[in-house]
Amino acid sequence: MQKISDAETLLKLSFLIRNSVVRMLCKAGSGHLGGSLSLADICTTLYFNTLNHQPNNPDWPDRDRVILSAGHLAPVLYATLAHAGYFEIEELYSLRKVGSRLQGHPAKDKGLPGIETSSGSLGQGLSIALGMALAAKIDSQKITIHTLMGDGELQEGQVWEAAMAAAHHKLDNLIAIVDKNGLQIDGKTSDVMNLEPLRNKWESFGWNVIECNGHNFNELIVSFESAKKSSKKPTVILARTIMGKGIKTIENDSRWHGKVPGQNEIADFLCQLEESYKAELNQPNL
Amino acid sequence: MSLHYKSLIPTRTGFGLGVLEAGKKSDNLIALGSDITTSVGMNYFADAFPQRFISLGIAEQNAAGVAAGLALMRKIPVFSTYAVFSALRTTDQIRVSICYNNLHVIIGGAHAGISVGPDGATHQALEDIAVMRCLPNMMVLSPCDATQAKILTEKAISDCLGPVYIRYGREPVPDFTDEDQLLEIGKAQTMKEGKDATIIATGHMVFPALEAAYALSEKGMDLKVVNIHTIKPIDKQAIIDAAKQTGLIVTIEEHQVTGGLGSAVAETVVQSHPVPVHIIGIPDCFGESGNPEELLDKFGLTSEKLESRILQILNDR
């Protein structure tokens, strides 16, 4: 797939993806809006710039892999896959319905193109990605394995088992991305279970650490490029994000972790998304 | 009459040799180490194929996930450690990362049963069959001796598609089955014919069950003995046939009496041909430290104790 590096185009794509996320969650009647919106720009950058993949040939063996460890953020992954051409956008609106390929959390057995693994029990994705990265190393296959994690998810012990093992095995073909929006269901991660100093934790586990603004496409592109150049060390990208990004009235509000817009809110939310998009288009550093 | 056996060999050795043989045939086989490599019989493969042995340290949850990742890349991972860890500590990882994806991962459950001995309750897996058995897509194997463990392990690796749990033990036990035995995954083995009652046993309990049956035959009781080496999918027809032929079933396992072989047999019997089923195992309690023989005796699982327990059941009939 052709790589898009132009920030304006990526911004337009992420706007369309957010728009789909809000619509599909409203239709589904349940799901996780806040984190889906915070992860949207990261997903956009991955699927439209960074990844080596073929949406019309989803099982291509030499594709880069993406493991959504934070399975509850499935809506933004589904929307990104659809906009990247993995399946029809119309199918997004089957989210969480009986018989749908778009389960509440990713389900590989439902056969949705682009879904590499089932996930949803937090903390498991990095281990799966690590197994894939090991397999690629064994086969001298030049591919990159990515895993998308929430910051609250880092409270799971398995993540640190995997972090230790990935550094031990020098897996420089592994990139972990942390959607660091600082919120989880019960409130601020700093109140629920403090993660800081997060950079030091990863560094002391032997990882190459990159911090960036998870809503700035140029920073994200540079971060992924830099991560791919890491030698003998896995890389974690700590991407600072805003839960609910794009809908001003819900931004940074942990109550929107697992909520969806009602029919009476959807028009307002879509309107806010468009306003945010237009405001960012006019920013000089785009 | 005493039963003939070749020698005393731990089933963990059979498992280990099975992994080694399968590894010779498939370059895709990858073994994962959780620090107790020799203890669980994986040393044979690790020594022969060090480049395909991946050490992951004492971190079983991660190891289960790594196994899933390898399988998603078409490798055949073998993840084995003590069953209390490989099956029970990692149940959620096995459920979501392995079973939900229906991945061909071989999970070895070493040191299963009360016969682990002196290490005590924490290390005696007595609930693993119950937990592994109820996971969708999971196959559950429980070989009766080292020879069978080797054959079943090779078959599990080469002939199966989804996740497989293989349960085996620590102590040397009679190695009494033939190298060229007729062994089909999912098919029960009739070890002895009989018409008065059927003993259905699994794992290390098959041999003492047979000894008890032969001892009872000298007292005029004609008992059928069935080896269930595949607990899931269980051979329903063999169980139904036994229920019809003998009208009484006694199950024996080194596992809790809830959720294991006895439950699997009872589920089949009550739905198809109800007859009394007596479940012999660990009576819903934790194990304790002691020599294996002492513990088996205390929990009534030696051939002598089984003989008297079965006799009591037959007399109470």
Image (tube, rainbow, N blue to C red):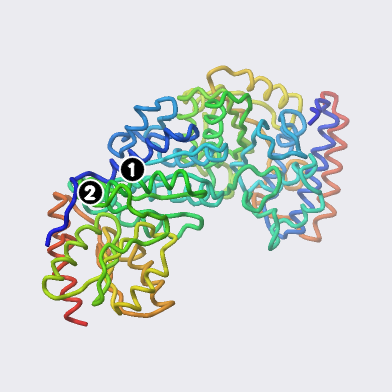
User: Residue B79 at x, y = what percent?
Assistant: 41, 40
**Which residue is denoted by mark 1 in the rendering?**
B15
Q: Earlier in the sequence, mark 1 or mark 2?
A: 1
Count how many numbered circles sit on residues in the image: 2
Assign the C terminus of chain A to one quadrant of the image: top right
The residue at the point 27 percent across, 64 percent down is B284
User: Residue A5 at x, y = what percent?
Assistant: 80, 25
Examine the rendered structure and indicate whether residue A104 appears above or below residue B119: below
**Which residue is denoted by mark 2 in the rendering?**
B175
Q: Residue furthest bottom?
A: B317
Examine the rendered structure and indicate whether residue B133 appears above or below residue B262: above
Query: What kind of element bears circle 1?
Result: helix
Is residue B192 shown to the viewer in this render?
Answer: yes
Indicate the amino acid at tag 1.
Answer: Phe
The residue at the point 54 percent across, 38 percent down is B69
Examine the rendered structure and indicate whether residue B142 appears above or below residue B312: above
Query: What kind of element bears circle 2?
Result: strand
The residue at the point 33 percent across, 67 percent down is B262
Image quadrant of residue A53?
top right
Q: Is the residue marked by circle 2 packed among few (<14), some (14-19), or many (20+) residues within 10 Å?
A: many
Camera-side mark, 1 or 2 = 2
Is residue A161 shown to the viewer in this render?
Answer: no
